[in-house]
Image (cartoon, rainbow, N blue to C red):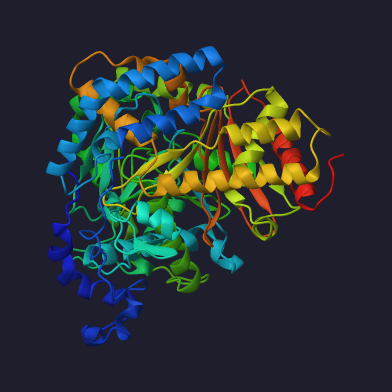
Amino acid sequence: MARLLSVRCVASLRKSIINSRTTALGITKQNYSSKKESSTEYWSQSDTPFMQHQKSLPRLPIPKLEDTVRRYLAAQRPLLDDDQFRRTEKFAHDFQSGVGKRLQEELVAQDKSNTHTSYVSDSCLNWFLSLRYTIMLTNPFLVFNPDPKTEYNDQLVKATNMVCSAMSFMKILQAGLQRPEVSHLNLTKREMDGFKGLVHRASSILSRPVDMSPFIRLFNSTRIPKRRVDELFTDEKAPHLLVMRKGNMYVFDIVDRDGDLVPPAEIQSHLKYILSDPTPAAAFPLGVLTSENRDVWAGLRDKLIAAGNAEHLQIIDSALFCLSLDDESMRDRIHLSHNMMHGDGCNRWFDKPITIILTKDGHAGISHDHAWGDGLAALIFQNEIFEETTKRPLVHPGSAAAAVDSASAVRRLEFNLDSELENGIRKAKENFDSLVSTLTFDAMEFKKGGKALLKKSKLSPDAVVQLAFQMGFLRRYGQTAAACESCSTAGFRHGRIDCIRPVTLQTQRCSHAFVLQPGRHSVEQLQAMLSECSTNHRQLIKEGTIGQGFDAHLFALEYLHDSEGEALHGLYTDPAYAAFDFSILETSTLTSPALDFSGFGPYAPDGFGLFYGVFDNRISCTVSSYPTRNVREFLQCVHKSLEDIFTVLEGKTLG
């Protein structure tokens, strides 16, 4: 059974938090007599305790089965021909009146007896932990914006500041002083009345805290490979950092015996020692094993333990987090995307919840496993690190590292490897090289308009970008493709994510009008279609965000169905349902002052992984694909689609 980090550590560590970093920052115990004076220690301190709102968060509602079936069929309609849809419709209605009705009753009963969590929590976690293919390409990455003070982008300076900031974040979480994040939903009174049992108050703007429980798995944790289903492991007491360079692994303590943080100058000294270590690149880098098929990696891990490496693996698993120091400088955004996504495979431990990556020329990013938490949690972490390192850095260019014996403090891990393990590592590297050689990244920047004009036109910016993706795919491949947009349900206790299905009959009709029927519609007709698409998309987002999507619900029912050992109903074996699991257009969006861009690998072998950002006067995309698709040609079609949309919004006819 996985050992998950308990909230009880908050209380037990509160006393040590009061003394943390006093040596590093020159703060005496007397400083803590006022909140104002303690703000240097707790740079994100809030009057609201970190977990205060957790118990009062609304529970994730279980949608009515008939609503879920209706929404599911509406999402399938534009993707299927008449015969295919009749088959899918028959499966869905049979499920609703038969086994689905029983499963719904069981799901509701289970939910009522597990009021501490959500009905999707177990199924979602199990899905991530059950993935058997490499997690390397499904682990998203988030690239930091550069520090505006360019001299602070030095690799050593930046790495030291980021480690210190990450540890401050951890201490604040453990002390329960991190400000709870708040979500904002624009809901009309009518919509609120329809879901008044799910929220605390109704207004035109709904603000509520988001679920902060994922953070208890952020530090001192790892994902351990097991046959069939991985495990999450945590050791709350481990004081050390894992640092990787050239495939070699180093550890040193950054929390002392009293629970205080090691002074920044001392951390700087240890990182400087690692960066200057002349040890050559590891001949057999264990990190590449974490890029393997999970069952293969589980077997090799057992062999590592049998060969006498259990202690070293325990050190890796329990490390606070992983810091990867790369020896390569980045050429451009595409090179940076590949580096943050996978690097050379040797200088990563993909099983850690969070890895902070620093390139030789000071580009920084985060790679995170999806099992412990979703993009929102990773972005919160990134935002806090960015704010601290750019506004209140603890070390500076020219700062002297502490005069400490780093050679004694830093330990390079050496492993016992036999020929079988060496062959396993060699094979894993071959598999890694083969896989990443097929992965393509490209980027697009549309500079002829953005959020400002779209909002002036009373259109949802998100709806327009999703429509442009559909139009681009239709323009390039002549068909409508299944699409998924990630949707956070973190406004609920133990909410995770759901999927918005942006392909609708409205978007299909609009795409055909723009791409396949040029000149057949007036500007006013095209504008009306855009407005209709926007209105419908806003409704899909609202439904998903308030727990009324259908994907997570159907999956929870499938998880329950499968756990009972019965053959799955035809709804779940229908090819139309399977196609939803690996959508051709897998999309996600995040924006913040800390984030330059993000990315992830395609979920489908013939699909795209699309990350996008909508700004006031521009729209950007970072897209991945495999050789079955040409990402550059696709992005050219997306760019053309955006040009057409903005041309129509300006009242001009298409050329």
Q: Residue most toward the right?
A: 655
Residue 362: in sight, yes or no?
Answer: yes
Residue 631: in sight, yes or no?
Answer: no
Q: How many marks can you see?
A: 0
Quadrant assignment, res 167: bottom left
Nearest the camera: 11 or 494? 494
Return the x and y of residue 44 as percentages of the image width and height. 36, 71
Name the quadrant of the N terminus: top left
Quadrant assignment, res 556: top left
Return the x and y of residue 165 as percentages of the image width and height. 38, 64
Nearest the camera: 442 or 123? 123
Nearest the camera: 110 or 296? 110
Name the quadrant of the C terminus: top right
Return the x and y of residue 646 as percentages of the image width and height. 75, 49
Q: Could you tell me which residue is drawn at 49 percent across and 73 percent down?
A: 391
Quadrant assignment, res 637: top right
Q: Could you tell me which residue is drawn at 61 percent across and 20 percent down?
A: 628
In the picture, measured across the screen, residue 480 lies left or right of residue 173, that is right
In the picture, measured across the screen, residue 614 lies left or right of residue 305, that is right
In the picture, measured across the screen, residue 23 lies left or right of residue 513, that is left
Q: Could you tell me which residue is drawn at 36 percent across and 63 percent down?
A: 202
Depicted 284 relative to depicted 193: above or below: above
Return the x and y of residue 246 as percentages of the image width and height. 46, 40
Depicted 302 relative to depicted 471: above or below: above
Q: Could you tell me which residue is drawn at 24 percent across and 20 percent down?
A: 99
Nearest the camera: 34 or 86? 86
